[in-house]
């Protein structure tokens, strides 16, 4: 147990994470609502993250996620929104895969205009590991063309249906618009997960 906790701390320190605890109940109608806010960022600021995931039954689910943040590249400053719609497949209690659509929009605050949207198809892997009755470790690895998302997190059940989640996220969105801008986010977040 101590080795697992040490490994998680190490990965969070050297890795790069706003998603809350992933869906684990894929029964029809089972829903999870996640809300996160950054507590410390290395790149990007003013981050929020909102996700709704719903089970479809027979090991399938959908997930819709929106992340908003401020970032900069060269001399410009951007307000960014990343939206995802994904279809998830539960392989077993610890592994899920997903595929979907990611759209990133940006507004150049310096010159006052929108950047061309970055739209990609994406795929990824979600891994979960129970570390006890109330503690779950998870990671999310995925992306598409010039978009990468890497997350590590710990979820602690406060009471049935409510969890406190800490995450670290490394979101890279590159080659956006004619200036080939980078709209990146790296940082720690704290959030709540409501399971219905």
Image: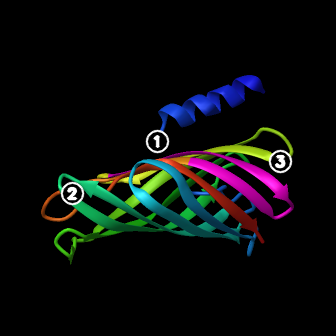
- Which numbered disc, 1 or 3, marks the residue that appears first in the sequence? 1
Disc 3, SS = loop
Whether residue 4 appears in this view of the structure is: yes
**Which residue range is magenta in the image?**
147-167
Is residue 118 shown above or below 133?
below
Q: Is residue 59 magenta?
A: no
> What residue would you read off at disc 1?
16
Asked if the magenta segment contains residue 166, the reply would be: yes
The residue indicated by pointer 3 is 134
Query: Gap between marks 1 and 2, in whole Å?
Result: 20 Å
Q: Which residue is mark 2?
A: 181
Q: Earlier in the sequence, mark 1 or mark 2?
A: 1
Crowding at mark 3 (Cα within 10 Å: few <14, some 14-19, many 20+): few
Q: Judge by depth and name the residue closer to the eye, 89 or 25.
A: 25
Left or right: where does residue 172 sit relative to residue 134?
left
Circles 1 and 3, Cβ within 8 Å, touching? The answer is no
Q: Looking at the picture, how far across and down is residue 62, in whole percent?
A: 59, 69
Residue 54 location (% of width, % of height) = 66, 71
The residue positioned farthest toward the top in the image shown:
3
């Amino acid at each position: 147990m101590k080795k697992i906790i040490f490994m998680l701390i190490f990965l969070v320190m050297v890795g790069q994470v706003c998603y809350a605890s992933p869906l684990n109940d894929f029964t029809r109608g089972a829903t999870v609502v996640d809300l996160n806010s950054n507590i410390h960022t290395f790149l990007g600021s003013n981050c929020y993250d909102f996700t709704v995931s719903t089970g479809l039954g027979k090991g399938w689910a959908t997930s819709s996620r929106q992340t908003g943040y401020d970032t900069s590249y060269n001399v410009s400053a951007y307000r960014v929104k990343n939206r995802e719609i994904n279809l998830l497949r539960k392989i077993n209690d610890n592994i899920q895969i997903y595929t979907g659509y990611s759209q990133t929009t940006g507004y150049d605050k310096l010159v006052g205009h929108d950047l061309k949207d970055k739209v990609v198809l994406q795929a990824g892997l979600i891994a979960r590991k129970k570390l006890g009755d109330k503690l779950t470790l998870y990671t999310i690895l995925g992306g598409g063309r010039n978009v990468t998302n890497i997350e590590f997190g710990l979820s602690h059940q406060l009471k049935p249906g409510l969890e406190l989640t800490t995450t670290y996220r490394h979101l890279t969105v590159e080659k956006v618009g004619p200036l080939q801008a980078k709209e990146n986010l790296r940082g720690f977040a704290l959030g709540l997960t409501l399971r219905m």
